[in-house]
Amino acid sequence: MARLCRRKAEIVLVVEEIIFEIIFMLTMLLRRCRNRGRFRISNVQRLSRYRMVDRIPQQLQHMNELIELSDDDCFNNLRMNRDTFNRFCYLLRHNGGLVDGRFVSVGEQVAIFLSVLSHHSKVRVVKFCFKRSSQTVHQHFHNVLRAVLNLHDILLATPTPVDDECTHPRWKYFKGCLGALDGTLIDVTVPEVDKARYRSRKGTISVNVLAACDRNMRFIYMLTGWEGSAADARVLRDALCREDGFKVPHGNYYLCDNGYPNGEGFLTPYKMVRYHLHEWGNGPSTPQNYKEFFNMNHSRARNVIERTFGLFKKRWAILKSPSFYPIRIQNKIILACALIHNFIRTESPNDPLDELLQITTVTQSDDDGFIDSVNPSQAWSNWRDNLAHEMFSQWMGAA
């Protein structure tokens, strides 16, 4: 009996030792697995940190290729030479309120913004080129957009009337003229429910943009946001009635086409008389009366707004096709493009795009000194007749 009890005690001890060994092995295995997981996590963290640091030389190299190597590369990618780019960054920094980010400088922010406008590049393409995240590209694009719009008082051109000393063949007949005015359609993306309102006479979904420019192809005024179905004259009336809208001093005027009424401040050509430049030539194609001579000179001078629109859309590819920003942002982008266009025309008189451009024309009180409405006027038509007779008499006398 004592032997049996001793045998049972030995068996219990062996079982306890076996259980202890199993528990010990499981504990060591768990610790080993846990250490392996920590090692893998630390390796991933080290790898990600290495990759983020490794991007910096690539980012610097890309910026160096854009704005440091040559004016040609800078112009082809950002639509302005290196000197103009640096001046633009300085203006945005000191007048537009743009500041350096923690990791992104003002120069790189502006380069990202101009890359999107110049080539209509998508965010995923820009982030690959600049080695930045999508959030970084999106954030700095809107930061620069706000800064550019803050410069509208600085970048919009101040109109200068044609004086008596002007000898330019296109403008010498139009004393007191401030420039030319017209509307253009720019394609946009809108929700499905709004497409009917934005559908233009050409069948495209677009906004009707009203713009006035001076003789140097710089924008004096721009109003965007009207649906493509709106008539040009309606958009102009709205611009004149706004509190901070379009200002035309009494005694001055803009050249317009027949889409606008011939009223005070807006000089249109004669209707039912040949007008476009390709209709004029030598011999029998020369003007035969004062109305034809007036229309020919009007067409030559008003052509400046057509060339401005052509250069404007040729410079910024984002205006050639609809973008997928909200319509409010798309309207702001159009205005920003116009402001930067003015800056380039001012800082870079020798614009390379001029050589590529080949276009031919196919509520204020009455006491403030500005015109606040546009309506057909017989007095204004009589003034146009007198101007046309005077122009034709000078031309005949010179001949």
Image: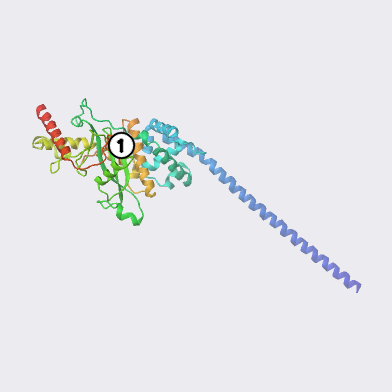
Q: Residue furthest bottom?
A: 1
70 and 359: which one is in front?
359
| Left or right of 374 on screen, residue 194 | right
Q: Position of residue 212 (x, y in %)?
A: 28, 38
Q: Amino acid at mark 1?
A: Phe
251 and 28: which one is in front?
251
| Left or right of 302 on screen, residue 206 | right
Q: Position of residue 316 (x, y in %)?
A: 34, 41
Q: Position of residue 327 (x, y in %)?
A: 37, 49
Q: Position of residue 206 (x, y in %)?
A: 30, 49
338 and 227: which one is in front?
227
User: In the rendered image, which quarter contains the N terminus?
Assistant: bottom right
Whether residue 134 appears in this view of the structure is: yes
In the picture of the structure, the residue carrying the numbered disc 1 is 219
**The residue tagged with tag 1: helix, strand or loop?**
strand
What coloring was used for the rendering? Answer: rainbow
Counting every numbered tag in the picture gives 1
Q: Residues within 10 Å of mark 1 (few under 14, many from 20)?
A: many
**Snapshot quadrant of residue 120:** top left
Q: Residue furthest top?
A: 165
Give the residue at x 9% y 27%.
397
**Snapshot quadrant of residue 277:** top left
Give the residue at x 46% y 44%.
139
| Left or right of 115 on screen, residue 208 | left
User: In the rendered image, which quarter contains the C terminus?
Assistant: top left
Q: Is residue 33 above or below residue 266?
A: below
Whether residue 127 appears in this view of the structure is: no
